[in-house]
Amino acid sequence: MTRSVTGTPASMKNPGRRGLLALSLAATAMPAFAQGSAPRLSGRAVTLGIIDVAGNLALTQKIFEAYTGAHADRVSRFAISRAPAPELAGKIRAMQRANRLDVDIVLTGTDGLAAGLEMDLWENIDRFADPALNADTLYDAGSRPLHDFARGNGMLIAYTPQGPFVQYMADRVPQPPTSVQALLDWAKANPNKLLYPRPANSGVGRTFLMGLPYLLGDTDPKDPVKGWDKTWAYLAELNNHIEYYPSGTAAMIREFAQGGRDIILSTMGWDINPRALGIVPKESKIAVLDGFHFVSDGHYAVLPKGLPQDRLAAALDVVRFMLTPEQQAVTYDEGYLYPGPARKGVTLDLAPESSRKVIQEYGRPIYDTLMAERPIETPLEPRALVAAFRLWDERVGGQKTR
Protein backbone atom coordinates (compact mmCIF):
# COMPACT_ATOMS: atom_id res chain seq x y z
CA MET A 1 0.00 0.00 0.00
CA THR A 2 1.58 3.30 -0.97
CA ARG A 3 1.24 6.28 1.33
CA SER A 4 1.98 9.93 0.88
CA VAL A 5 4.97 11.39 2.68
CA THR A 6 2.67 12.91 5.31
CA GLY A 7 1.56 9.44 6.37
CA THR A 8 -1.97 9.63 4.98
CA PRO A 9 -3.16 7.01 2.48
CA ALA A 10 -2.19 7.80 -1.10
CA SER A 11 -4.63 7.35 -3.96
CA MET A 12 -4.66 3.80 -5.22
CA LYS A 13 -5.13 5.17 -8.71
CA ASN A 14 -1.96 7.22 -8.60
CA PRO A 15 0.37 5.99 -5.85
CA GLY A 16 3.19 8.22 -6.99
CA ARG A 17 1.19 11.45 -6.95
CA ARG A 18 3.34 13.21 -4.35
CA GLY A 19 6.62 14.49 -5.76
CA LEU A 20 9.32 12.74 -3.74
CA LEU A 21 12.57 14.39 -2.78
CA ALA A 22 15.83 13.15 -4.22
CA LEU A 23 19.18 13.74 -2.57
CA SER A 24 22.41 14.12 -4.55
CA LEU A 25 25.53 14.05 -2.38
CA ALA A 26 29.03 13.16 -3.47
CA ALA A 27 30.14 10.32 -1.20
CA THR A 28 33.68 9.52 -0.26
CA ALA A 29 34.87 6.00 0.35
CA MET A 30 33.92 4.63 3.74
CA PRO A 31 36.89 4.39 6.08
CA ALA A 32 37.78 1.01 7.50
CA PHE A 33 36.59 0.25 11.03
CA ALA A 34 37.97 -2.31 13.40
CA GLN A 35 35.88 -5.39 14.09
CA GLY A 36 33.44 -4.61 16.89
CA SER A 37 33.59 -0.83 16.59
CA ALA A 38 30.84 1.32 15.14
CA PRO A 39 31.44 4.79 13.74
CA ARG A 40 30.58 7.58 16.15
CA LEU A 41 28.09 10.33 15.45
CA SER A 42 29.87 13.38 14.08
CA GLY A 43 28.13 15.92 16.31
CA ARG A 44 26.50 17.70 13.37
CA ALA A 45 23.22 17.05 11.67
CA VAL A 46 23.28 15.28 8.30
CA THR A 47 20.67 14.65 5.64
CA LEU A 48 19.98 10.98 5.00
CA GLY A 49 18.58 9.49 1.81
CA ILE A 50 16.02 6.72 2.16
CA ILE A 51 14.71 4.56 -0.66
CA ASP A 52 11.66 2.37 -0.07
CA VAL A 53 11.07 -0.57 -2.40
CA ALA A 54 8.75 -2.51 -0.07
CA GLY A 55 5.97 -0.08 0.80
CA ASN A 56 7.55 0.02 4.25
CA LEU A 57 6.89 3.72 4.77
CA ALA A 58 3.26 2.77 5.38
CA LEU A 59 4.59 1.40 8.68
CA THR A 60 7.61 3.57 9.42
CA GLN A 61 6.81 7.08 8.19
CA LYS A 62 5.85 8.12 11.72
CA ILE A 63 9.03 6.58 13.09
CA PHE A 64 11.19 8.74 10.87
CA GLU A 65 9.17 11.78 11.83
CA ALA A 66 9.64 10.90 15.51
CA TYR A 67 13.37 10.52 15.00
CA THR A 68 13.87 13.96 13.47
CA GLY A 69 11.67 15.41 16.22
CA ALA A 70 13.82 13.85 18.93
CA HIS A 71 17.24 14.04 17.25
CA ALA A 72 17.31 17.05 14.94
CA ASP A 73 20.93 17.51 16.02
CA ARG A 74 21.78 14.19 14.35
CA VAL A 75 19.59 14.11 11.23
CA SER A 76 18.19 17.35 9.86
CA ARG A 77 15.87 15.64 7.40
CA PHE A 78 15.25 12.48 5.41
CA ALA A 79 15.15 12.68 1.62
CA ILE A 80 12.70 9.94 0.68
CA SER A 81 12.20 8.18 -2.63
CA ARG A 82 10.52 5.02 -3.83
CA ALA A 83 11.40 2.52 -6.54
CA PRO A 84 10.31 -0.92 -7.77
CA ALA A 85 12.21 -3.71 -6.04
CA PRO A 86 13.66 -5.20 -9.28
CA GLU A 87 15.41 -1.87 -10.00
CA LEU A 88 17.05 -1.56 -6.59
CA ALA A 89 20.24 -3.61 -6.94
CA GLY A 90 21.22 -2.09 -10.27
CA LYS A 91 20.54 1.42 -8.98
CA ILE A 92 22.66 0.97 -5.85
CA ARG A 93 25.49 -0.73 -7.72
CA ALA A 94 25.63 2.12 -10.24
CA MET A 95 25.85 4.67 -7.42
CA GLN A 96 28.61 2.73 -5.69
CA ARG A 97 30.65 2.40 -8.87
CA ALA A 98 30.32 6.13 -9.51
CA ASN A 99 31.18 6.87 -5.86
CA ARG A 100 28.02 8.98 -5.64
CA LEU A 101 25.79 7.29 -3.09
CA ASP A 102 22.73 9.35 -2.30
CA VAL A 103 20.95 6.50 -0.50
CA ASP A 104 21.87 5.78 3.13
CA ILE A 105 19.05 3.48 4.23
CA VAL A 106 17.20 1.02 2.04
CA LEU A 107 13.79 -0.27 3.16
CA THR A 108 13.29 -3.56 1.37
CA GLY A 109 11.61 -6.92 1.48
CA THR A 110 13.33 -10.23 0.87
CA ASP A 111 13.36 -9.61 -2.89
CA GLY A 112 15.53 -6.47 -2.91
CA LEU A 113 17.57 -7.82 -0.02
CA ALA A 114 18.35 -11.04 -1.90
CA ALA A 115 19.35 -9.26 -5.09
CA GLY A 116 21.71 -7.02 -3.14
CA LEU A 117 23.22 -9.96 -1.27
CA GLU A 118 23.97 -11.63 -4.58
CA MET A 119 25.88 -8.51 -5.67
CA ASP A 120 27.52 -7.89 -2.26
CA LEU A 121 25.99 -4.40 -2.00
CA TRP A 122 25.07 -4.22 1.69
CA GLU A 123 27.05 -3.17 4.73
CA ASN A 124 27.63 -5.96 7.24
CA ILE A 125 26.06 -4.61 10.43
CA ASP A 126 27.09 -7.60 12.53
CA ARG A 127 30.73 -6.57 12.30
CA PHE A 128 30.06 -3.60 14.58
CA ALA A 129 28.94 -5.89 17.45
CA ASP A 130 26.46 -3.21 18.52
CA PRO A 131 24.56 -4.27 21.69
CA ALA A 132 21.47 -2.34 20.54
CA LEU A 133 21.43 -4.39 17.31
CA ASN A 134 22.02 -7.80 18.88
CA ALA A 135 19.75 -10.33 17.20
CA ASP A 136 19.67 -12.58 20.28
CA THR A 137 18.13 -9.75 22.27
CA LEU A 138 15.79 -8.43 19.61
CA TYR A 139 14.11 -11.41 17.96
CA ASP A 140 12.09 -14.45 18.97
CA ALA A 141 11.75 -17.89 17.39
CA GLY A 142 9.34 -16.55 14.77
CA SER A 143 11.22 -13.48 13.55
CA ARG A 144 14.80 -14.64 14.14
CA PRO A 145 14.99 -17.03 11.15
CA LEU A 146 13.79 -14.26 8.87
CA HIS A 147 16.33 -11.83 10.32
CA ASP A 148 19.06 -14.42 9.71
CA PHE A 149 18.06 -14.39 6.04
CA ALA A 150 20.01 -11.11 5.81
CA ARG A 151 23.26 -12.83 6.92
CA GLY A 152 24.15 -9.85 9.09
CA ASN A 153 23.77 -7.45 6.18
CA GLY A 154 20.66 -5.73 7.49
CA MET A 155 18.17 -5.62 10.35
CA LEU A 156 14.65 -7.00 10.28
CA ILE A 157 12.36 -4.10 11.23
CA ALA A 158 8.89 -5.53 10.47
CA TYR A 159 7.62 -9.10 10.47
CA THR A 160 4.62 -11.13 9.36
CA PRO A 161 3.93 -14.83 8.84
CA GLN A 162 2.13 -13.47 5.74
CA GLY A 163 0.10 -16.17 3.91
CA PRO A 164 -0.87 -17.12 1.20
CA PHE A 165 -4.67 -16.92 1.41
CA VAL A 166 -7.50 -16.85 -1.11
CA GLN A 167 -9.52 -13.64 -0.87
CA TYR A 168 -12.95 -13.40 -2.47
CA MET A 169 -16.31 -11.66 -2.49
CA ALA A 170 -18.99 -14.01 -1.21
CA ASP A 171 -21.70 -12.50 -3.43
CA ARG A 172 -19.64 -13.41 -6.51
CA VAL A 173 -18.03 -16.62 -5.20
CA PRO A 174 -20.59 -18.49 -3.10
CA GLN A 175 -18.40 -21.60 -2.84
CA PRO A 176 -14.75 -20.53 -2.51
CA PRO A 177 -11.99 -23.00 -3.38
CA THR A 178 -10.31 -24.60 -0.37
CA SER A 179 -7.64 -26.64 -2.17
CA VAL A 180 -5.14 -25.92 -4.93
CA GLN A 181 -7.03 -28.23 -7.28
CA ALA A 182 -10.30 -26.48 -6.51
CA LEU A 183 -8.59 -23.14 -7.17
CA LEU A 184 -7.44 -24.37 -10.59
CA ASP A 185 -10.89 -25.76 -11.37
CA TRP A 186 -12.49 -22.47 -10.41
CA ALA A 187 -10.08 -20.53 -12.63
CA LYS A 188 -10.91 -22.81 -15.57
CA ALA A 189 -14.63 -22.27 -15.03
CA ASN A 190 -14.20 -18.50 -14.56
CA PRO A 191 -11.55 -17.33 -17.05
CA ASN A 192 -9.72 -14.11 -16.19
CA LYS A 193 -11.49 -13.71 -12.85
CA LEU A 194 -8.47 -14.81 -10.80
CA LEU A 195 -5.48 -12.53 -10.30
CA TYR A 196 -2.13 -12.46 -8.53
CA PRO A 197 0.87 -10.12 -9.08
CA ARG A 198 4.27 -10.84 -10.58
CA PRO A 199 6.32 -12.38 -7.75
CA ALA A 200 9.45 -10.31 -8.38
CA ASN A 201 7.44 -7.13 -7.75
CA SER A 202 5.07 -8.20 -5.01
CA GLY A 203 5.16 -9.69 -1.54
CA VAL A 204 1.78 -11.28 -2.25
CA GLY A 205 3.04 -12.79 -5.50
CA ARG A 206 6.19 -14.26 -4.02
CA THR A 207 4.30 -15.56 -0.95
CA PHE A 208 1.95 -17.47 -3.25
CA LEU A 209 4.90 -18.69 -5.31
CA MET A 210 6.83 -19.94 -2.27
CA GLY A 211 3.74 -21.36 -0.57
CA LEU A 212 2.65 -23.54 -3.47
CA PRO A 213 5.35 -26.24 -3.09
CA TYR A 214 4.03 -26.95 0.41
CA LEU A 215 0.41 -26.99 -0.76
CA LEU A 216 1.25 -29.31 -3.66
CA GLY A 217 3.61 -31.59 -1.75
CA ASP A 218 6.55 -30.89 -4.04
CA THR A 219 9.80 -32.79 -3.53
CA ASP A 220 11.85 -29.88 -2.15
CA PRO A 221 10.04 -26.61 -1.32
CA LYS A 222 13.42 -24.89 -0.85
CA ASP A 223 14.75 -25.73 -4.33
CA PRO A 224 12.84 -24.07 -7.18
CA VAL A 225 15.23 -25.43 -9.80
CA LYS A 226 15.18 -29.15 -8.97
CA GLY A 227 12.37 -29.54 -6.46
CA TRP A 228 9.35 -27.70 -7.89
CA ASP A 229 8.12 -29.93 -10.73
CA LYS A 230 4.53 -29.87 -9.46
CA THR A 231 4.65 -26.15 -8.77
CA TRP A 232 5.85 -25.12 -12.23
CA ALA A 233 3.35 -27.44 -13.92
CA TYR A 234 0.51 -26.07 -11.80
CA LEU A 235 1.44 -22.43 -12.42
CA ALA A 236 1.76 -23.05 -16.16
CA GLU A 237 -1.74 -24.53 -16.27
CA LEU A 238 -3.18 -21.77 -14.09
CA ASN A 239 -1.57 -19.23 -16.41
CA ASN A 240 -3.95 -20.31 -19.20
CA HIS A 241 -6.84 -18.79 -17.24
CA ILE A 242 -5.20 -15.54 -16.07
CA GLU A 243 -5.44 -12.50 -18.32
CA TYR A 244 -2.29 -10.73 -17.09
CA TYR A 245 -0.09 -10.22 -14.03
CA PRO A 246 0.05 -6.78 -12.39
CA SER A 247 3.53 -5.43 -11.72
CA GLY A 248 2.52 -4.60 -8.15
CA THR A 249 0.07 -5.60 -5.44
CA ALA A 250 -1.81 -2.29 -5.41
CA ALA A 251 -2.98 -2.77 -9.00
CA MET A 252 -4.40 -6.18 -8.11
CA ILE A 253 -6.21 -4.78 -5.08
CA ARG A 254 -7.69 -2.01 -7.20
CA GLU A 255 -9.12 -4.47 -9.73
CA PHE A 256 -10.57 -6.63 -6.96
CA ALA A 257 -12.11 -3.61 -5.23
CA GLN A 258 -13.68 -2.39 -8.47
CA GLY A 259 -15.20 -5.78 -9.25
CA GLY A 260 -12.93 -6.69 -12.16
CA ARG A 261 -11.68 -9.86 -10.44
CA ASP A 262 -13.56 -12.18 -8.14
CA ILE A 263 -10.66 -14.00 -6.46
CA ILE A 264 -7.18 -12.75 -5.65
CA LEU A 265 -4.27 -14.33 -3.81
CA SER A 266 -3.67 -12.37 -0.65
CA THR A 267 -1.92 -12.15 2.72
CA MET A 268 -2.98 -11.06 6.19
CA GLY A 269 -1.81 -7.48 5.73
CA TRP A 270 -3.21 -7.05 2.24
CA ASP A 271 -6.52 -8.35 3.51
CA ILE A 272 -6.76 -6.19 6.65
CA ASN A 273 -5.29 -2.88 5.49
CA PRO A 274 -7.27 -2.24 2.26
CA ARG A 275 -10.51 -3.00 4.11
CA ALA A 276 -9.50 -0.67 6.95
CA LEU A 277 -8.76 2.07 4.41
CA GLY A 278 -12.13 1.58 2.71
CA ILE A 279 -10.55 0.47 -0.56
CA VAL A 280 -11.81 -3.13 -0.46
CA PRO A 281 -15.30 -3.89 0.87
CA LYS A 282 -15.23 -4.84 4.53
CA GLU A 283 -17.34 -7.93 3.82
CA SER A 284 -14.75 -9.62 1.60
CA LYS A 285 -13.78 -13.06 2.86
CA ILE A 286 -10.69 -15.24 2.98
CA ALA A 287 -10.32 -19.00 2.48
CA VAL A 288 -7.52 -21.27 3.70
CA LEU A 289 -6.26 -23.92 1.29
CA ASP A 290 -5.80 -27.52 2.42
CA GLY A 291 -2.24 -28.23 3.55
CA PHE A 292 -1.62 -24.54 4.26
CA HIS A 293 1.80 -23.42 5.50
CA PHE A 294 2.64 -19.81 6.25
CA VAL A 295 5.60 -18.35 4.38
CA SER A 296 7.01 -15.57 6.52
CA ASP A 297 7.96 -12.18 5.19
CA GLY A 298 9.31 -8.96 6.53
CA HIS A 299 10.96 -5.67 5.81
CA TYR A 300 14.59 -4.83 6.42
CA ALA A 301 16.67 -1.75 6.88
CA VAL A 302 19.91 -2.23 4.96
CA LEU A 303 22.78 0.16 4.42
CA PRO A 304 24.71 0.31 1.15
CA LYS A 305 28.45 -0.23 1.34
CA GLY A 306 30.55 2.87 0.81
CA LEU A 307 28.82 5.43 3.03
CA PRO A 308 31.04 8.13 4.56
CA GLN A 309 31.55 7.86 8.31
CA ASP A 310 29.17 10.62 9.42
CA ARG A 311 26.24 9.29 7.38
CA LEU A 312 26.96 5.67 8.29
CA ALA A 313 26.95 6.57 11.99
CA ALA A 314 23.67 8.46 11.64
CA ALA A 315 22.06 5.68 9.60
CA LEU A 316 22.98 3.10 12.26
CA ASP A 317 21.53 5.38 14.92
CA VAL A 318 18.25 5.56 12.99
CA VAL A 319 18.10 1.77 12.75
CA ARG A 320 18.65 1.48 16.51
CA PHE A 321 15.76 3.90 17.05
CA MET A 322 13.52 1.92 14.70
CA LEU A 323 14.03 -1.20 16.82
CA THR A 324 13.15 0.32 20.20
CA PRO A 325 9.95 -1.16 21.69
CA GLU A 326 8.06 2.15 21.45
CA GLN A 327 8.79 2.56 17.75
CA GLN A 328 8.23 -1.12 16.97
CA ALA A 329 4.71 -0.79 18.38
CA VAL A 330 4.03 1.78 15.67
CA THR A 331 4.42 -0.93 13.01
CA TYR A 332 1.06 -2.44 13.92
CA ASP A 333 -0.16 0.53 11.86
CA GLU A 334 -3.50 -0.29 10.22
CA GLY A 335 -2.72 -3.97 9.72
CA TYR A 336 -0.54 -3.37 6.68
CA LEU A 337 2.01 -6.08 7.57
CA TYR A 338 0.11 -7.84 10.35
CA PRO A 339 1.20 -8.22 13.06
CA GLY A 340 4.10 -5.84 12.19
CA PRO A 341 6.67 -5.68 15.00
CA ALA A 342 9.84 -7.67 14.44
CA ARG A 343 11.07 -7.19 18.00
CA LYS A 344 9.90 -9.76 20.52
CA GLY A 345 7.55 -8.76 23.32
CA VAL A 346 5.90 -5.88 21.45
CA THR A 347 2.25 -6.82 21.83
CA LEU A 348 -0.88 -5.15 20.48
CA ASP A 349 -1.67 -3.50 23.84
CA LEU A 350 1.49 -1.39 23.35
CA ALA A 351 0.33 -0.13 19.95
CA PRO A 352 -1.31 3.26 19.37
CA GLU A 353 -5.04 3.33 20.05
CA SER A 354 -5.79 3.81 16.35
CA SER A 355 -3.97 0.56 15.53
CA ARG A 356 -5.79 -1.35 18.24
CA LYS A 357 -9.15 -0.17 16.90
CA VAL A 358 -8.31 -1.22 13.34
CA ILE A 359 -7.20 -4.70 14.34
CA GLN A 360 -10.25 -5.15 16.54
CA GLU A 361 -12.62 -4.16 13.72
CA TYR A 362 -10.88 -5.49 10.61
CA GLY A 363 -8.63 -8.27 11.87
CA ARG A 364 -9.74 -11.88 11.71
CA PRO A 365 -9.52 -14.17 14.78
CA ILE A 366 -8.62 -17.04 12.45
CA TYR A 367 -5.27 -15.40 11.74
CA ASP A 368 -4.12 -15.62 15.35
CA THR A 369 -5.38 -19.21 15.52
CA LEU A 370 -3.49 -20.16 12.38
CA MET A 371 -0.29 -18.47 13.58
CA ALA A 372 -0.44 -20.62 16.70
CA GLU A 373 -1.26 -23.87 14.88
CA ARG A 374 0.19 -23.94 11.37
CA PRO A 375 3.84 -24.25 10.27
CA ILE A 376 5.64 -20.98 9.52
CA GLU A 377 8.24 -21.47 6.80
CA THR A 378 11.08 -19.10 6.01
CA PRO A 379 11.43 -17.68 2.49
CA LEU A 380 13.82 -19.11 -0.05
CA GLU A 381 17.47 -18.30 0.43
CA PRO A 382 18.68 -15.37 -1.72
CA ARG A 383 20.15 -17.39 -4.60
CA ALA A 384 17.12 -19.68 -4.74
CA LEU A 385 14.72 -16.74 -4.56
CA VAL A 386 16.41 -15.00 -7.48
CA ALA A 387 16.23 -18.28 -9.43
CA ALA A 388 12.53 -18.66 -8.62
CA PHE A 389 11.79 -15.17 -9.93
CA ARG A 390 13.73 -15.89 -13.13
CA LEU A 391 11.99 -19.21 -13.71
CA TRP A 392 8.55 -17.71 -13.10
CA ASP A 393 9.29 -15.00 -15.67
CA GLU A 394 10.56 -17.57 -18.17
CA ARG A 395 8.05 -20.37 -17.65
CA VAL A 396 4.89 -18.71 -16.43
CA GLY A 397 4.03 -15.03 -16.76
CA GLY A 398 6.92 -12.93 -17.95
CA GLN A 399 5.20 -12.19 -21.25
CA LYS A 400 1.91 -11.30 -19.56
CA THR A 401 3.15 -8.82 -16.97
CA ARG A 402 2.09 -5.22 -17.12
Image (cartoon, helix red, strand yellow):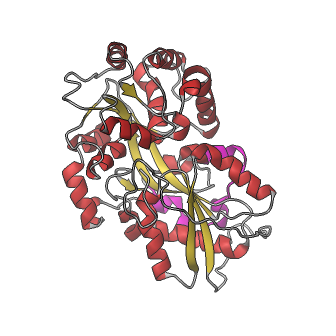
Residue 66 located left or right of residue 232:
left
- Tell me if residue 152 can be seen: yes
> Which corner quadrant of the image does residue 35 belong to?
bottom right
> Which corner quadrant of the image does residue 345 belong to?
bottom left
Look at 36% across and 18% down and name the residue there.
Answer: 187
The location of residue 91, given as percent across then percent down, is 69, 51
Numbered range of the magenta stretch: 113-139
The location of residue 117, given as percent across then percent down, is 67, 47
Taken as a whole, is the magenta stretch helix, strand or loop?
A: helix
Q: Residue 39: within the magenta? A: no
Look at 44% across and 18% down and name the residue there.
Answer: 238
Q: Nearer the viewer, residue 191 or 123?
A: 191
Number of labels in the image equals: 0
Instruction: Tell me: residue 13, above or below residue 123.
Output: above
The location of residue 320, given as percent across then percent down, is 52, 69
Q: Nearer the viewer, residue 239 or 381?
A: 239
Instruction: Tell me: residue 175, above or below residue 401.
Output: above
Look at 42% across and 53% down and name the residue there.
Answer: 140
Instruction: Tell me: residue 125, above or below residue 249.
Output: below
Q: Nearer the viewer, residue 293 or 266?
A: 266
Residue 248 located left or right of residue 289:
right
- Tell me if residue 132 can be seen: no
Instruction: Tell me: residue 13, above or below residue 59.
Output: above
Look at 53% across and 40% down and name the residue there.
Answer: 201
The location of residue 191, given as percent across then percent down, is 37, 17
Q: Residue 121: within the magenta? A: yes
